[in-house]
Amino acid sequence: MQIFSFVNQKGGCGKTTTAINLAGALSAQGRRVLLIDLDPQAHATLGLGCDPGDGPTTLDVLSGSSSLSEAVVAVAGGIDLVPAALSLGEFEERAEHSLRPEQALTHALRGLEGDYDEVLLDCPPRADGVLTANALRACDTAILVVETGAFALQGAVKALSIFEEIRACGDSRFDMRVLATLFDRRTRFARDMLFALHSRFGPLLFESVIRTSVRLREAAACGVPVQILDKRSRATNDFAALASECLVGSTDSVRGKDLAPTPLPGE
């Protein structure tokens, strides 16, 4: 069972969109996929058309009042989801008075190895919170999602340094990868930005690039992964390529390698 977390220290980079539609792409390839929403904004839950109602959520799993299997909901695209609600923010408030709260998810995931091939963790838009710490401790690979927009490179470098510090200070030994999203090949700026990401992150950067797509916004509005909305769209193809790359990468681990990217000129 491979566990991927989707991280950044800012919103609007396509992190949740990536988590949802990569889950859909993996499921379309016959994989057994679990998506866990670790964001109190619950965008992955909303993006898959799920209303947890009075049922257990991620908060119940992390606080120990419900098992992970009890919180699982089947959603579109053959994906299993552990939904979140705004109340998940309470977990970070309680963490200050808890013993090792960053280990809660690791404990909850124990025993699932025979149930799923991949587990995807959609993190909140911050790098230093206890929810992200849970994801990084539990995951095999942390995927830094970077939009190809203004100031994204500087933000990605800062986020990567934070994750390196987290890994160095704890006993987490996750791999790190970088994914370029919201790419518009029609603009020179986006093309230059993608080149800069390649130069900066080298082999940490996925070859797959997620392009901007109206279909992705429509799929989120419909509460389904894009594979259900339009299986022939370019967005579906982008995520199919990313899924294949993730599956190949899971058999060619670079765990423990130095995360330090190539220095920028003048550094």
Image (cartoon, grey):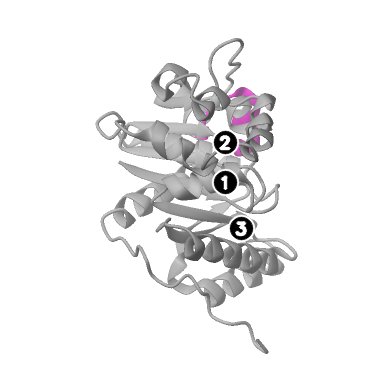
Type of amino acid under label 1: Thr
- Residue corresponding to mark 1: 132
Q: Which residues are magenta?
A: 215-226
Q: Quadrant of the C terminus?
A: bottom right
Q: Give residue 9's mark.
A: none
Q: N-terminal of the two: label 1 or label 2?
A: 2
Image quadrant containing the N terminus = top left
Going 54% across and 48% down the picture, which residue do you hit?
A: 133
Could you tell me the amino acid type at mark 3?
Val
Across and down, in percent, residue 173 comes to 40, 58
Q: Residues within 10 Å of mark 2 (few under 14, many from 20)?
A: many
Q: Are marks 1 and 2 in contact (CB under 8 Å)?
A: yes
In this rendered view, identify the residue nearer to me: 206 or 157.
Answer: 157
Q: Is residue 233 visible?
A: no
Mark 3: give few (<14), some (14-19) or many (20+) Cα within 10 Å: many
**Does 73 sit above or below residue 34?**
above
Label 3–label 1 contact, CB within 8 A: no
* Residue at 43% in and 73% down: 258
Task: Give the x, y percent position of residue 69.
Answer: 39, 21
Pick the residue in front: 202 or 258. Answer: 258
